[in-house]
Amino acid sequence: MVIKEIKIIGLGGIGSIFVNKLVRFINHCDSGGEALGWNVTLIDGDDYEVKNKQRQEFIFIKNKAVSKLEELNNLVAESIENAIPEFITESNVTEAVRENDTVFLCVDNHKTRKIISEHARTLNNVIIISGGNDYTDGNVQCFIREHGKSLTPSLTDYHPEILDPPDKLPTEMSCEELANSDPQLFFANLTAATIMCMFAYKLVTLPLNEVKICESYFDITSMAVNSVQRQPRC
Amino acid sequence: MATKKELMDKTNAELRQMCKNLGIVGMTKKRKEIIVKALLANQKANTDAKAAKASDQPATIAKPKAKPAEQAPLTSMAYQMQSTLSKPSAKVGDKCTTTLMVSCGANSGSFPVAGRKVGEVKGFLKEALNIPSFPDAVVNGKKVEDKYVLTEKDTLEFLKPAGRKG
């Protein structure tokens, strides 16, 4: 699988930081400043709100995907192609995630993670890197499918809480529910984004069948990061 | 190989120096008889190890008669399980590889839990690794039941739920 089409889904605390670093890397990667030639699509149905300024990086107060596209086009991004101002649902996931896509998933609910993961299982070639955090800890998962075979476990294989998510999609939530989000720590978002950058670097430097790590956990309070390998389930 | 009589003829200082050279700890304030006993046990262990190496068969380590003076709580478990002799020429205490990597989320460590059931280890390391109440266990990348008995070269992971926010 040749990495060419990048989808970044979710531009909150993790996504809004991660996308800036990834686009910088794509445009000026370490091999003499050469561009990687990846096309990036930003996807998020949410609007940026100033109340989140302590942990989300935006300049313009509008839809997050549109805002970030505008911001990055002014800076570096020849490779930013598209912004889709929509949340992912079961009805639009087939349009959003396609064969040969590499998806960086930075959403704030397990239900969206499940929709993406289940859809990815139906594709022959796809990469999903999914980051999430609680207040001071979190994890990043890496699901790779190549030639119709899962090289690493899906997002749900070892996570029953994603397989049977207790939460709702943003499209199913009331305005009150959307407004009452749990507090988050900027450093937890930043650590998840950094580990996603590590996975991006692995994808550039290693053949897919050598990216053995399927999940990395971090804990800010104990200052620990632990990466694990697991076998995909049939 | 020194006999018991030859060892008893040496001074305490000489015997303690021998212990130091052989890596036998905790003998600084022990009586001569005990030091000699420890040296003889060490000699016997080395002889057994050489014999095992010669026959190319994995050997088991007998419970040592000389108890180290400073013993961490987990070390006592090591004497109750089967351990293959991986480095016969190493110092006493370093001859076996018996610790396994156990992790839960970002927390991990090496623990002498070979021969133990996963369920036992879960209870034992619950606080040390901050293991959640009903975690699934994964050994060498595959999910296992609590009754699974850990063997050498196993890597045990207790699954931690994924972070939800982003």
Image (cartoon, grey):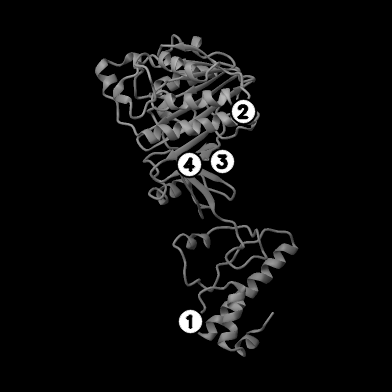
Where is residue B83? Give x, y as percent: 59, 58
Q: Which residue is mark 2?
A: A204
> Can you tell which mark lies on residue A209?
none
Whether residue A147 is visible here, answered yes or no, is yes
Q: Residue furthest left?
A: A176
Tell me the distance, in whole angstroms, between the alpha carbons under discs 3 and 2: 27 Å
Instruction: Please state which amino acid type lies under the numbered disc 3.
Output: Asn
Q: Residue furthest front?
A: A74
Instruction: Please state which amino acid type lies under the numbered disc 4.
Output: Val
Secondary structure of the residue carrying tag 1 is loop
Looking at the image, residue B8 lies above or below residue B93: below
Secondary structure of the residue carrying tag 3 is loop
Q: Chain of mark 4?
A: A
Q: Residue at x 40, y 31 (%)?
A: A189
Tell me the distance, in whole angstroms, between the alpha carbons under discs 4 and 2: 22 Å
Front label number (4 vs 3):
4
Q: Which residue is mark 3?
A: B140
Please state, as top left, top right, bottom left or bottom right, where the N terminus of chain A lies in the image.
top right
> Can you tell which mark lies on residue A225?
4
Q: Chain of mark 1?
A: B
Q: Which residue is mark 1?
A: B29
The image quadrant of residue B1 is bottom right
Numbered marks: total: 4
Q: Is residue A112 left or right of residue A101?
A: left
Please state, as top left, top right, bottom left or bottom right, where the C terminus of chain A lies in the image.
top right
Instruction: Please state which amino acid type lies under the numbered disc 1.
Output: Lys
